[in-house]
């Protein structure tokens, strides 16, 4: 699969304020360059695993089919390892110095997808069977554990004076990731209205943990390993967190209005599952009468019918939920850009990071 | 539950060569002392988790029932954290310095039980529902992940110059643990005879990874954190690995001949599941004609009947498998004792460690 696949820009998500026509080729080139650097090290690390979890990992990374036939799928766009490489270069360190961080981040990302798919019962991932669906729940639990352990080891063994600090960052991120996932699962069971309903602030805290922490760590971990000053690593971590929240906001829009042909998920999938995502919460905050209506449409205890789900999506859109989420994403990407441009970082690599973050706004999957 | 519970000595496992009458009270006192030191820190660490995985963890540690009622079960004997404390004191450091290592080791142990019970389909653990049985598979996966992340963080944040080295030890152990579990799961599906049958050496490598690595790390991690010289940490790690293999050998004996009333598992449970454990492999090595007989009795593809399982257990015992495993355990405990007594360690704490290791031989659960 070419690096461009899945990265075309749908008009509905395009933002004239942040996305210049020139940023997409720049971002795509940066992704390809970083992938070329990181993938051999990632493959080598995974080859050191026990063959069974190794086989499941290779499938999840898109290197082989479930029966071991090589090269049939996509392992994702590689945004997170690219953030690690570009962040490291932005502080003036070599791209090579970023490789352990980039490998660790991609391992953690894949571990979290494997285990989250078990928790969420998701049978499909990147247009293929998810790990538990293809190999069974037990083997997928173990393969996730293997990637988790390998990630910690990769950072701990990076031969560097700053390894301990990097492991602390990684460990803190891992704790946040789990906390965010626990909230995300829990939110599905919370009511649509009343004192126990999920609020916008609570949602943001969850998304900051579940998505922001990993992207923040991705962007800062290489620089921490390279011994960059805290002011710069903090700025990069903060920018990464903003990108994470922006990514999640776009993900939430795609979870309701994404094209099933492209996302590989059923239309309106998040609404079917009762997920209280940003567009829904923003719409309910703007229009308090919406909560009881959504509850009637979606909260009956049984899976809602097609017409109810479509009606709910329309109500959320009419109340401005979709526009709010996309505006939120654009605002965060702009804030991160401004934050980074104010720091003494290597300008072309900051430009690459900014281009990559604008691509996040334009994604369809 | 008192610290003595489950630690009475069955005559069948008693070894006059290694177990003096005086060692049991010494070991029980050491376990109680270490538990008193470590448990408050462990509870504090777990209280910092998200409430959902925190609740599942509290149940697994025996602090509450599945509905949250406090104090109904046992979280195990606390052998691993005690090894961490005693190992640290044995190199002359304070018991307090061992607490982060002891907490991390107990977190990892519990993580591995939670996830292993999912993989093995085990519904009972310590006479109660296992985590996945009580709370569901997804929540148990997440709770395990939370404990794993917390363990890494606990070691990474131990305010010590040797934190990086300690994290490396932890990470290496985690990789071994997963590798060993992958082999253990795989061995159940391997044939009883022929070129693909599991050999004794392969079994030992699996047990060294699955059980030896955690006990080795438990015994050496505190000393590493305290900055002890490599010669001493290596000796302690090696002793811990031997104890792990001894523990596994006794576990294998209990998995076939243990009293179901005490172990909480069905009689001959390992044979029912086709597990190729040490007594079975040793018996087959001593008596090559045994393999095809066991295959006929246990390997039919369907769960074997009661009479076949009983017959298989008797055949393994008659071929000396049970005696071999117990002898193997005693030899390892003696080797570890001799290894530690040859090093310049704090004698009373080495005596505690030796007493504890002899208790492992005497356990019934």
Image (tube, coloured by chain):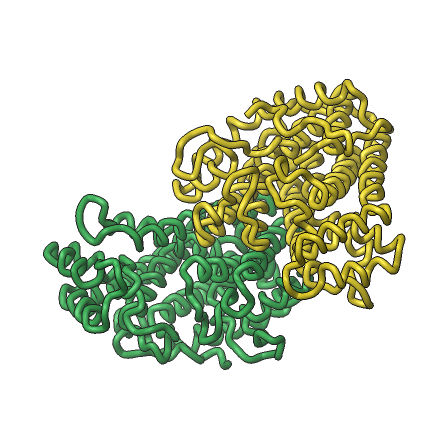
Chain colours: A yellow, B green
Whether residue B7 is situated above or below residue B122 in the rendered picture: below
Could you say which is closer to the camera, residue B22 or residue A360?
A: A360
- In the rendered image, residue B354, in percent from the top left (x then y), is placed at 39, 65
Snapshot quadrant of residue A9: top right
* Residue A357 is at least partly visible in this image: yes
What residue is at 52 percent from the left and 49 percent from the top?
A: B170
Could you say which is closer to the camera, residue A174 or residue A9?
A: A9
- In the rendered image, residue B307, in percent from the top left (x then y), is placed at 19, 73
Whether residue A321 is situated above or below residue B50 in the rendered picture: above
Check the image and name the residue furthest to the left. B289
- In the rendered image, residue B256, in percent from the top left (x then y), is placed at 28, 69
- In the rendered image, residue B190, in percent from the top left (x then y), is placed at 27, 50
Horizontal side of residue B127 vs A24, given as left or right: left
Could you say which is closer to the camera, residue B42 or residue B234?
A: B42
What residue is at 55 percent from the left and 61 percent from the top?
A: B140
Horizontal side of residue B211 vs B18, given as left or right: right
């Amino acid at each position: 699969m070419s690096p461009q696949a899945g990265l075309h820009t749908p008009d509905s998500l395009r933002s004239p304020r942040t996305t210049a026509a020139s940023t997409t080729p720049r971002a795509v080139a940066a992704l390809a360059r970083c992938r070329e650097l990181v993938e051999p090290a990632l493959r080598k690390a995974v080859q050191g695993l026990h063959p069974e979890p190794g086989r499941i990992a290779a499938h999840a990374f898109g290197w082989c089919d479930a029966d071991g036939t090589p090269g049939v799928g996509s392992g994702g766009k590689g945004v997170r390892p690219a953030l690690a490489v570009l962040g490291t270069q932005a502080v003036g360190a070599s791209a090579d110095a970023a490789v352990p961080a980039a490998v660790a981040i991609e391992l953690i990302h894949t571990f979290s997808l494997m285990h989250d798919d078990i928790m969420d019962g998701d049978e499909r991932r990147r247009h293929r069977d998810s790990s538990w669906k293809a190999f069974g729940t037990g083997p997928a639990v173990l393969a996730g554990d293997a990637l988790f352990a390998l990630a910690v080891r990769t950072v701990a063994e990076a031969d560097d004076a700053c390894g301990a600090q990097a492991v602390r960052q990684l460990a803190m991120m891992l704790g946040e990731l789990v906390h965010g996932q626990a909230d995300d699962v829990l939110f599905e069971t919370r009511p649509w209205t009343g004192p126990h309903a999920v609020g916008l602030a609570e949602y943001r805290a969850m998304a900051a943990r579940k998505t922001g922490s990993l992207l923040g760590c991705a962007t800062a971990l290489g620089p921490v390993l390279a011994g960059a000053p805290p002011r710069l690593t903090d700025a990069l971590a903060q920018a990464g967190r903003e990108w994470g929240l922006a990514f999640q906001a776009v993900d939430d829009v795609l979870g309701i209005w994404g094209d099933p042909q492209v996302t590989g998920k059923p239309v309106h999938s998040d609404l079917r599952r009762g997920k209280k995502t940003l567009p829904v919460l923003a719409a309910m905050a703007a229009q308090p009468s919406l909560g009881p209506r959504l509850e009637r449409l979606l909260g009956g205890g049984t899976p809602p019918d097609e017409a109810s789900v479509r009606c709910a999506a329309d109500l959320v859109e009419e109340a401005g939920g979709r526009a709010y989420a996309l505006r939120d994403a654009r605002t965060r990407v702009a804030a991160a850009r401004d934050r980074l441009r104010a720091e003494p970082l290597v300008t072309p690599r900051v430009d690459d990071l900014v281009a990559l973050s604008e691509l996040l706004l334009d994604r369809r999957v």
